[in-house]
Image (spheres, coloured by chain):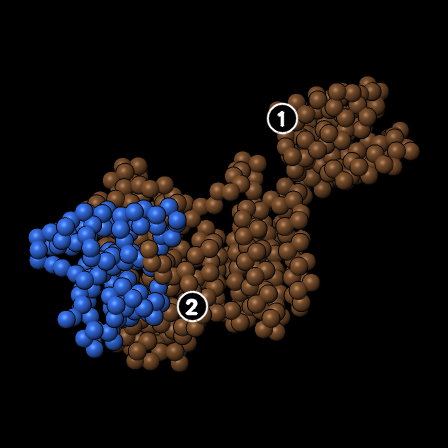
Chain colours: A brown, B blue
Amino acid sequence: MQKVLVVDDLDSNRLSLVLSLEKIDGIEIYEAKDGLEALELCIRKKMNLIFMDIMMPNLDGFETTKYIKQLSPDAMIIALSALDDEMAKNKMLSLGAEDYLTKPIDPTLISLRIEHYLNIIAFRSQRDVSNKQTVINPFNKQIFSKKIIYTIENKNSLGEFWDDCLNTASVITDISDVVRLIYGLGLWLLKNNFRFDIYIESNNDFTYITLLHQRTLRHTIVKNLIYKHFPWLNYFFNTQVLSFKLKNISMETETIEGEKPSIKSTFSSLTAKEYIEMTPINFLSKIDQLDMINDKIDLAILEFERNPGCPSIQNVCNELKTYTKILAQLMEFEHLGYALEMLIVFLLEIEEKQFNDETIRKTETILLSIAYDLASWRENIFIKQSAIDIHYLDASLLSSCMQLEAIFEPESGKEDENEIEFF
Amino acid sequence: MLKRVILVDDSKTILATAEMALEEMIGKGIIEFKTYLNPIELLDNLLAGTEEYDLLISDINMAQMNGLDLCEQLKSHSKFKNKPILILTTESSSEIKTNGKAIGVTGWLVKPFSNDKLIKAIKMVLGL
């Protein structure tokens, strides 16, 4: 049932509106005689539609609108304004009211208006997130129909992207990091005469910002940049796109300004024994599955040694994918799964012509080592329960995967002075 | 005399990658290179006198033992206190680096490392 609130200090005004509302099915009607009372009601119950008078004692319509929009951004507020009060009307709209009704309200028109408002509110909570045909982000096909596209041809258009994302009230976590990163990469692309597009797609829970770079961004450079400066970002990178998955902020979860989790600190430090104690037994049955898949990964890598090439690499990736699916079912190992997913993406992008004696030898060595590390990890956490921190492999595995990528990409030539530091 | 470099890291991938990066130096007889997966085993061998190094390269986040704890124990031992230690790690926070510096590590190399950087770091520390 939609909850509708009428806020007006004059009994007669409230009554007139309430009588019109009572003709409509499927709504609960509430009343408040001033802004304070309205605010108290909104704190106790989530109102969907609010008719708000402007001039009221205790707390006027302006202030009440501002507070309620902070409490419930989705609430639709309709200003009730006097005939000749254009300034007040405009101020209400700027504070978040979505429409206005001019008093005295015509009862013959109000019912239709109310029905329109209720339809929009109903649509708001059921926005179409069915699978879309043309989806740019690689994370999720279930997104809203609305898509924002920036065609970046010069610094002005890049600035527009920056401005739109950062100078409007944002309900997206970490958006400033992503915008700054894309802006920096965008400047480099423009400097090298590459034009590109940025897509912004979203659903109820996430926003996806994707840069279509079409093979112009260097794999190891971008990954190193993100790994070292923005390790908390959830991203996907291949030869065509660099895409970020960002969580939409809900009222239940606040981000604390200045606190950025890193790969190392996203999860609290747990010893293996502590982890086993807090994990349900049925989760732990997955360990045997991990053992089986580990064996299959080893076999797939040996097959790659016998018949090196893209088809055998595909087999390795299939087994790694199964491994990551099981990892995803265990608590706490999201980053480990993420590192493997990055590895899979990279392996699948290797072209046949990139395989030569040296790259084959090195790839096989590193893949076998990664398989060993995963088996060792399983043993240290679940069998011996000896690991002093269950996340000891997270960052290391990600960097190991990047070491593999470096085999196929020549040194960038640009020295990173931060890599060695002597005391 | 051949300089002996030991790398301790619980990731076989890192050990394998480092070994590949140092192939030429090892092949030309510039350094001896030994790897350990288990820091406790390394520490036991060092204290027992069955192992030694001219340069130790150590990870920090290892399953069995924190690398800085390993370094602290070695730096408090008369036989090893003047031997250089390079940290090879994903950690780059100033707080951890300060801890490392206080313990007496010689340098800090951040993963993922390039072959050139690893070779350069070893050459600089050993004066090669």
Label 1 marks a residue whose chain is: A
Q: Position of residue A289 (x, y in %)?
A: 28, 53
Amino acid under disc 2? Glu
Q: In percent of the image, x 65 and y 34: which residue is there?
A: A70
The residue mark sitting in front, 2 or 1, is 2
- Earlier residue among tags 2 and 1: 1
The answer to whether B43 appears left or right of A406 in the picture is left
The image position of residue B56, as x and y in percent, is 22, 59
| Residue matched to label 2 | A415
Image quarter for residue A294?
bottom left
Residue linked to disc 1: A43
Residue A1 visible in the displayed image: no
Which corner quadrant holds the N terminus of chain A? top right
Q: Nearer the viewer, residue B62 or A394?
A: B62
- Residue A387: image x %, image y %? 24, 46
Judge whether A177 appears above or below B120 on screen.
above
Q: Residue at x 75, y 20 (%)?
A: A58
Circle 1 crowding by C-alpha within 10 Å: few under 14, some 14–19, many from 20 = few
User: Who's the residue at 39% across and 49% down the image?
Assistant: B94
Mark seen at residue A378: none
